[in-house]
Amino acid sequence: MMRTRTQVGIVGAGPAGLLLAHLLARRGIESVLIEIRSREYCEARQRAGVLEDGSVSLLRGAGVGDRLDRQGLEHGGIYLQFGGERHHIDFRDLTGGRTVTVYAQTEVVKDLIARRLADRGGDAIRFSVSDTEVAELDSDRPVLRYTDADGTRHEVICDAIAGCDGFHGICRPAIPAGALTVWERDYPYAWLGILADIPPSTDELIYAHHPAGFALHSLRSPTVSRLYLQVDPDERIETWSDERIWAELARRFELPGWTLQQGPVLDKSITPMRSFVSAPMRHGRLFLAGDAAHIVPPTGAKGLNLALADVAVLAPALEALLHGDGEPAASYSDSCLARVWRSTHFSWWMTTMLHRTPGADEMEQQLQLSQLRYVVSSRAAATSLAENYTGFVPLPTGPLSTGPAPTGAPPSGAPPTGAPPVQAERSQ
Ligand code: FAD
Ligand code: DHB
């Protein structure tokens, strides 16, 4: 057993763990970051694609936005398609100029891994570890244990541990039963997602309501498309040939005078859909961030943004804690949960408005169509969608998250109702 010491032990090298390690390093705080998967696996895992402008400002302010600035595609709205018509929701007009940026999670992860390795060398991230354990969470010296890729067991004595290990990780289950409250909702559908080597057939994302089920046309670059289909949760990917997928996508996006361009499928997978919030996001010296603490169905494009926002709050809170000021760490959970619940509600709202519930009666569809017609014909309703999609509860502002202010603020400039005061990052 190798025994070592660090300030912050970080479990999981997804967007949350990677950005946290980087933000802490910029504050002069040392961390050990471990990951069960290989670097190649982490860099290839197809997931999110849409960044709120607050997330873009955060990454830029943290010095990891160069490629994002060059290759990210700024989008000023989305299309909502239903009842045989396609309607544009113009975020810039509705929110006083706010936008989102299409830049794949794979690229955010690659940028953050490259930056950690450049700043700290080969041991900055310990990939392919196994048997991760966290212990002594109630003490001020929590312990992180893992076995490295060569089979050596490690014990790392920490001042704090960040559980950034996603929904299926080990950190949340390490919190004693009874110390957490959990809210959970499973949806009776899943998303079949494909990556296709074909230029997108649209300039902005299309969210389509169709009697056969929801479909989404997104993109990864001017030459690569990303598309999703609502399918049953127990559907097996083997039963979906490329031809069947394209035929179903063409049917759900059908519009006179418009053609869905089809091309080689590079990747395909099925993802279940769930809403999940556990609180508080802290137990003793263990802090949960990102999907480890909360999951949203992907329809609102919020999960990655929430993960980045959590660690933007956590980094200064941990810095303060390590310097003897426990107050920001004490308010970490409440500060994040205001944003988490807003996004949880928005994602649920988008999901239930756009998906067909298997076995639902005809009334569900009429209610959905009425809501969709309202969104595209009422400026108030469209503004509500636009300000939530672009990010309603502001991210912390400060030296590592500077950008056009107020980046995530509502268009009126008024504070979002119910949001706690946002923690400012401390200058060093
Ligand atoms: P993860 O990315 O899950 O990272 C956790 C890491 O911990 C993983 O690398 C995992 O291997 C590692 N790990 C797990 N257990 C252990 C262990 N025991 N020891 C060490 N390491 C461990 N979000 C958006 O904002 N916009 C979108 O457009 C969007 N679209 C999506 C589309 C799909 C199809 C899916 C599946 C998700 C989408 N999301 C979207 C959600 C987004 O991808 C997640 O919310 C995001 O990955 C959360 O980041 P994270 O770092 O918290 O967790
Ligand atoms: C993508 C994923 C989403 O969940 C979404 O709402 C929009 C875009 C994407 O992967 O591009």
Image: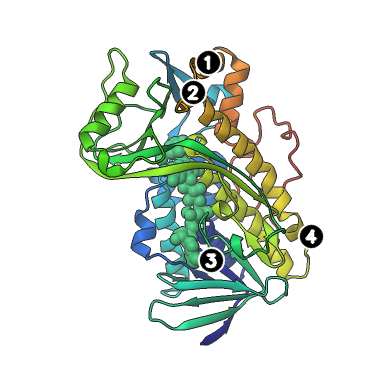
User: Which residue is at the front of the view, 331 or 273?
Assistant: 273
- Residue that label 3 marks: 11
Looking at the rendered structure, the kind of residue marked 4 is Glu
In the image, the residue with mark 3 has its CB under 8 Å from the nearest atom of ligand 1? yes
The label nearer to you, 3 versus 4, is 3
| Residue at figure coordinates x 75%, y 37% from the top left | 418
Point out residue 170 in the picture as x, y percentages from the top left corner: 55, 64
User: Which residue is at the front of the view, 13 or 355?
Assistant: 355
Question: Are there few (<14), some (14-19), or many (20+) residues within 10 Å of tag 4?
Answer: few
- Position of the C terminus, as image quadrant, is bottom right
| Residue at figure coordinates x 60%, y 30% from the top left | 387
Q: Residue 363, which numbered label? A: 1
| Residue at figure coordinates x 29%, y 27% from the top left | 248
Q: CA distance from mark 4 to mark 1?
A: 50 Å
- Residue that label 4 marks: 327
Q: CA distance from mark 3 to mark 2?
A: 41 Å
User: Which residue is at the front of the view, 246 or 258?
Assistant: 246
In the image, the residue with mark 2 has its CB under 8 Å from the nearest atom of ligand 2? no
Which structural element holds mark 2?
Answer: loop
Q: Residue 360, which numbered label? A: 2
Q: CA distance from mark 3 to mark 4?
A: 23 Å
Question: Are there few (<14), some (14-19), or many (20+) residues within 10 Å of tag 1?
Answer: few
